[in-house]
Image (cartoon, rainbow, N blue to C red):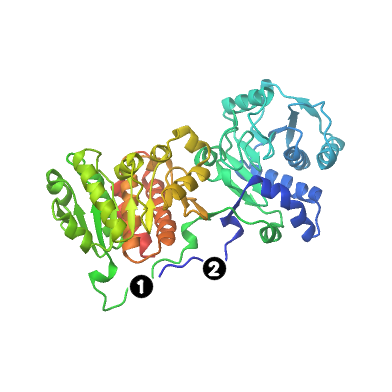
Amino acid sequence: MLEKNASLSLTQKLYRADQVRQHEKQAAEAMGLDLYALMQRAGKAVFEQSVQLLPNIDNYLVLVGVGHNAGDGYVAALHAVKAGKNVVLCAVEPDREVQGDVAKAREAFEQNGGKVEHFSSELLDKAEVVIDALLGTGINGVIRAEFAEVIDTINDSKLPVVSVDIPSGLCGDTGESLGRCIQADVTVTFVGIKLGLTTGAGKQFCGKLVFEDLGIGKAFAKIARSDATALDIKHFKGLAPRPVNTHKGNHGRLLCIGGNAGMSGAIRLASESALRTGAGMVKVFAHQNSLVQISAGRPELMVISDGLDEALEWASCIAIGPGLGTDAWAKGVFDKVMDYCQHHPKPIVVDADALNLKAVNTRFVSLSDCIITPHSGEAARLLNVSIEDVESNRFNFARQCAERYDATCVLKGAGSIVDNQQHSWVCRHGNPGMATAGMGDVLTGVLSSLLAQGLTTDMACQFGVSIHAKAGDIIAEKYGQRGLLPSDLFETIRVLVNE
């Protein structure tokens, strides 16, 4: 049996940006601190991360706005000054009065010889690192033109950037760029990890994500309810050892359905990855013109092109979609499987063309123990929205897919999201090399194999998404991202599922 650690660590809990703003003061007070003390800790953490990123450089450019992030920037600049660095601090609106703790931090910086200057692109010529404290999580709507211009200039400079709490211009809840967004090399986020830093464009913009709880994380976690959970392979105990007297029937009878004429590769990838993840028996139902291609080189697969009714009865779990197509043959197969599963509930993974057929099917079919695995294009078709809509708020649309189709949704992409209609999980693993045809088919095989072996829908999704993405990372680290093939993951998935 697979079990997750009983208590979630602070780094696993994800929050909306407004939750952090609303509750950090109360959490600080519970620890005998005020917000200015938090600002001091935040600024110090940013400077330390800048040193860790580039330990042997002397010329710092610090950019500040007028909000709370600016205060962190002033403190980071002061630490740099005290460390003997050459510091240029620029404000987009240097003459605008700042208030409260930000004013205190600015005053401390100026009292130690610091100056607040107007930003100009010429200042980048001598800079070796940029600390981005322009905009925080409180911005609403598209950012103003003067900030957009600075952000464009910084991004064009290609200088390394350390962002304070969140890259300027990023929505902390969705990961959407609000017109313009800093491309950071490192983002140091505080108190609670914001949802938008973990998926989609936000995962790209924040670069390496560093979490600093500023000494109040536990107190904060007692007050604020986490909106989602980060998935990391190290937080799983793994599958229990098999009994000595076990047999193949104890580990699932998986039926993989797809592989239309000319599209045999997808269902072969799904079915072989299911075997490598530990399914006891895997049968493939495919178009008769695909039988040889699917079975060639993998005799362990049972491949058929007729007898679908008997195969559905035989199966303890079903996966449908890879290479299925959308022609008359595919529609006939799809309708028969949906009708069968509605009257004979079995765990099922619906992927690829089965999702496209589901999106245009006028008769809604609700299936128990169902996992759907759309990428953003398929999710857009399922919900009749644009791909841009889906990518602008991946958490929201993963939830909508789950609710509309009464399923657990795995929304694939950078920071894949699992949503069971009540809670969300987001995967920390994965890399751009996995953006290649067939990678989702391998995931379908992993998920359906875990279901067939008796894992719950939630645990199959959480563990399956994690080992699939982690396998991609291991292979990419060893050989590089370009040229990464879905079938390259098989042996590493086998290793991970046995750990």
Question: Which of the two discs, 1 and 2, sits closer to the camera?
Answer: 2
Residue 199 appears in the rendering: no
Q: Label 1: how many residues lie within 10 Å, few (<14), some (14-19) or many (20+)? A: few
Image coordinates of residue 327 in percent, x first then y, are 22, 38
Image coordinates of residue 366 in percent, x first then y, are 37, 53
Q: Residue 241: which numbered mark, if any? A: 1
Residue drawn at point x = 46 percent, y = 68 percent: 3
Kind of residue at badge 1: Pro
The residue closer to the viewer here, 326 or 235, is: 326
Image coordinates of residue 277 in percent, x first then y, are 31, 60
Q: Quadrant of the C terminus?
A: bottom left
Residue 120 appears in the rendering: yes
Q: Which residue is mark 2?
A: 6
Sequence-first disc among 1 and 2: 2
Q: Is residue 240 above or below residue 385?
A: below
Q: Quadrant of the N terminus?
A: bottom left
Secondary structure of residue under mark 2: loop
